[in-house]
Amino acid sequence: MISNDPSARAVRLPLALLMLLIITAAISGGLNRGDVIIVMVVRLMAVICLAAAIVKLSTARLQGVRIPLALLALLAIWMVLQLVPLPPSIWTTLPGRERLASAANTVGMPQPWMAISIVPMRTLNSLLALLIPAAALVMTAWLPKETWMTQIRIIVAVGVVSAVLALVQISGSPDSSWYLYNVRQKGGAVGLFANRNHQAVLLATMFPMLAVLGVRAARVRGRGLAVALSCMAIAIFLLPLIFITGSRGGLVVAAVSLIATMALVWPFMRKLQLSRKWLAVGGGLVAIVALGLVATLLSDRSLAMKRLTETDVGEEQRVLVVEPIVRLIRENLPIGTGFGTFDPAFRAIEPYSQLFRTYLNHAHSDPLEFVSDGGVPAACILLAFVFWWLKTTFTIWARPRVGDTARMATIVTALLMISSLVDYPLRTPLAAMIFALLIGWMSRAVANHDAADIDVIDRKDHPTSVRRDREHRVPG
């Protein structure tokens, strides 16, 4: 419950808007196709958030997220330029446009005006998809850091809902109405998504968030340890579901997530003195998860382990197509084929020997597809972002007084980027929104006017520092 304090009342609108953005992304943001009407719901909510920010938010508050926002703006500008119609004398000379030019010559038609994008409507859809991360970044700048824990709780709640939904899905018929999308992976534990890999990655990103919630709770006397153990219980509930999804990439991301989570909470665990009762409870929970994992591995539902042991990864389609994708990139340098056009562009050069009953809607490697679509300008934007992320991550972990929320953000964004090397989770609205939100936290944690990202619990212990922070807060 928000108090009647003026600063608390100022938080109500942006926090309510962000909650609605997260909820709509959870309900309609598990699919990345632009031809699905339900995806427009979350984009409409993003437009509402941006419109409210334009009216209410001062430009000074945007300074904390200026670099990621600028990189996103550069990406949007390049997409717009790819949509500009060009005369035949220009576009026919562009690399990789020989096939398009020969088509008009074959039927005896004059060459039309065409854009850099070979399918402008797909590029326009990619441009509209940027509304969601843009809204998340702006909302991050609008909301104070004291709301970060509330935002984490909402995201974790979404992850738990997706996990419970996955359990319901595999308990019923593959044609059950519990599947939100009419996709080929019906019958699997996909939760709020249309793809098991994206579901597994979402569940894996919950571990660092639960760790932050648990650590914060354990610092508070009374029921704090009970809340911390509840967070551990949720993590135990989520872990076997990653095996059940059948995602091998999800297993790898989950393993990295657990290791990174231990690194996040280890400094706190060394200082924590638990009674024998709580140690016994914690040990019992660990024993339960161990038994649960063994039972999952031995059951027919452990699809991920089956796919690891029974499938020759080297013969899979996504491995075989790497060489032709690289050739596609070379043929269309330096401008690319247009954002969102990978499917039609790849079909034009797909080797006959690699034709399958299924088709590649994406490259299953976002860096490769990003460069294929956007060429050299996209590669430069991507490299600039990676450099900024590495520099920001190093700064966050190097500062002793940076809060654990910012460190958690570096872990979760790293997990999503690792998954993007062999898949495309960030193309789903839900993952894109979470990623942008945490990128905003990282940016604010190292911003000059937000130099010390001190934990809320620490600020309560030092009222003078709270008062000093409020006196120097940038007006907005």
Image (cartoon, rainbow, N blue to C red):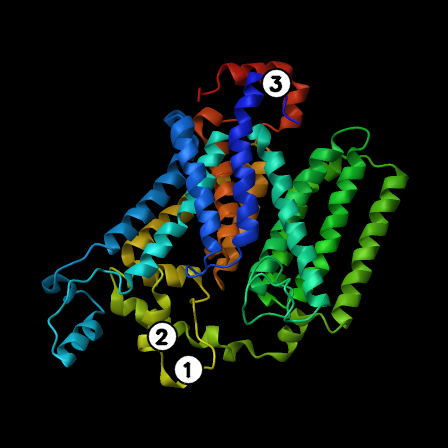
- Residue that badge 2 annotates: 324
Residue 354 numbered tag? 1
Residue shown at the point (25%, 55%) measured from the top left: 83
Judged left or right of residue 191, residue 373 is left
- Please give left or right for residue 147 compared with residue 64 in the image: right
Looking at the image, can residue 144 be seen? no
In which image quadrant can residue 245 be found? bottom right
The kind of residue on which mark 3 rests is Asn
Q: Secondary structure at mark 1?
A: helix
Q: Where residue 239 appears, x then y in whole percent?
A: 70, 57
Q: Residues within 10 Å of mark 3 (few under 14, many from 20)?
A: few
| Most foreground residue, 214 or 184 | 184
Q: Which residue is mark 3?
A: 4
Q: Give percent across and percent down for residue 190.
A: 61, 63
**Which residue is depicted at the point 64% across and 62% down?**
178
Provide the secondary structure element on which disc 3 rests.
loop
Q: Amino acid at mark 2?
A: Pro
Disc 1 crowd rating (10 Å Cα; few below 14, some 14-19, many 20+) is few
Q: How many marks?
A: 3
Between 262 and 2, the residue placed more toward the observer is 2
Q: Are marks 2 and 3 in contact (CB under 8 Å)?
A: no
Q: CA distance from mark 1 to mark 2?
A: 10 Å
Marks 1 & 2, CB-CB < 8 Å contact: yes
Where 269 sits versus 240, above or below? above
Whether residue 358 is situated above or below residue 92 in the rendered picture: below
Instruction: Residue 157 in the image: state x and y as whole percent.
Output: 66, 45
